[in-house]
Image (tube, rainbow, N blue to C red):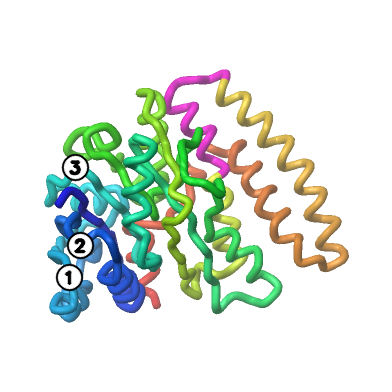
Amino acid sequence: MDVAVIIPTLRRPESLTRALRSIFAQTGVEQRVAAVIVVDNDPLASASSTVDGLRAGSPFPLVYVSEPTPGVARARNAGLAVTDAPLIAFLDDDEAASPGWLAALLAAQAQTGADAVFGPITGRAPEAQDWLKPYLERFFGRDGPAETGLVDHPWGCGNSLLVRATALPGDAPFSASADHTGGEDDILFAALAARGGRFGWAADAMVEEFAPAHRATLNYALTRAFAYGQGPSQTAAAARNWPGVVRWMIIGAGQAVVFGAASLALTLVNNPKRAQMYDRTARGVGKLFWMKGFEPRFYGAAEVARLDRT
């Protein structure tokens, strides 16, 4: 019993149910899962009834944790606080894992000795406009090498397996500074890389990610693309690597000009590939406007406020 699966959630009962059922269907790991931990980040503790309703069907110990202060980093840290498992797998509440998902992550970690292992994601945007759907499904997806092995860069926490001793130092390894903006995993993995940590890829650890209606829009995706673009500049600034900040800003300016011009040309002819050019333009602009005050808020209090309005 050496691995715990952590699923942070915030008022997504249907998605959470789908995610948990996909964990219950995992094969080849019956003797390894110490706990499946659901961290409810809703001040109203709304996921409690969902977890209670599914508990009888779980082949693994199912643990419910209430973290009433909204924040994505806080939720991940709360899940870690209730387990001493040496291996930690993260699945997001809008994801569903294939039956061999966890076994593939564990096998890849054993093969590579990596401190953090990531797997592929197939994006699903069933409610998106037809012309946007191909772009959005790529946006919410994740591609990587065809074969399992070591890689030279990390991805996000959704669909990952981390070695606690090396990748998750301290009692609260995820930075609360990212509670409302996201990017807590970027900060974690940048620090891991600086310590000489190794990253791996599990080619068979497949997950599907389902974009809810409010996210399956061009506006949402471009806002996220802008935030992703901010990441390299912000990481360099956090390390006080000012030449690096300047370098990323120069790259961003070039991307904004080149892809902005391509966006305009494709918009004039109503080409659906314009969405990808908008995305690349937004990422370039993000590298320029990385400073505090320009950070979009997707999580924590901002998400609770959005849910309260709907």
Q: Nearer the viewer, residue 99 or 15?
A: 99
- The residue wearing badge 3 is 86
Q: How far is the residue under mark 1 from the one under mark 3?
A: 20 Å
**Residue 267 quadrant:** bottom right
Task: Tell me where residue 209 appears, x and y as whole percent.
Answer: 46, 65
Q: Between disc 2 and disc 1, whose residue precedes?
A: 2
Disc 3 residue type (three-letter): Pro
Q: How far is the residue under mark 2 from the one under mark 1?
A: 8 Å
Residue 11 appears in the picture as rendered: no
**Residue 274 quadrant:** bottom right
**Residue 103 quadrant:** bottom left
Residue sitting at x 45%, y 56%:
204
Q: Helix, strand or loop at disc 2? A: loop
Residue sitting at x 26%, y 51%:
76
Q: Nearer the viewer, residue 95 or 200?
A: 200
Q: Magenta part of the protein: which range?
A: 229-243
Quadrant of the image for the C terminus? bottom left
In the depicted structure, whether residue 258 falls above or below residue 236: below
- The residue wearing badge 2 is 30
Q: Nearer the viewer, residue 51 or 265?
A: 51
For residue 213, side relative to residue 56 (left or right): right
Task: Tell me where residue 48 appears, x and y as whole percent.
Answer: 17, 73
Are discs 2 and 1 less than 8 Å apart at CB?
yes
- The residue wearing badge 1 is 59
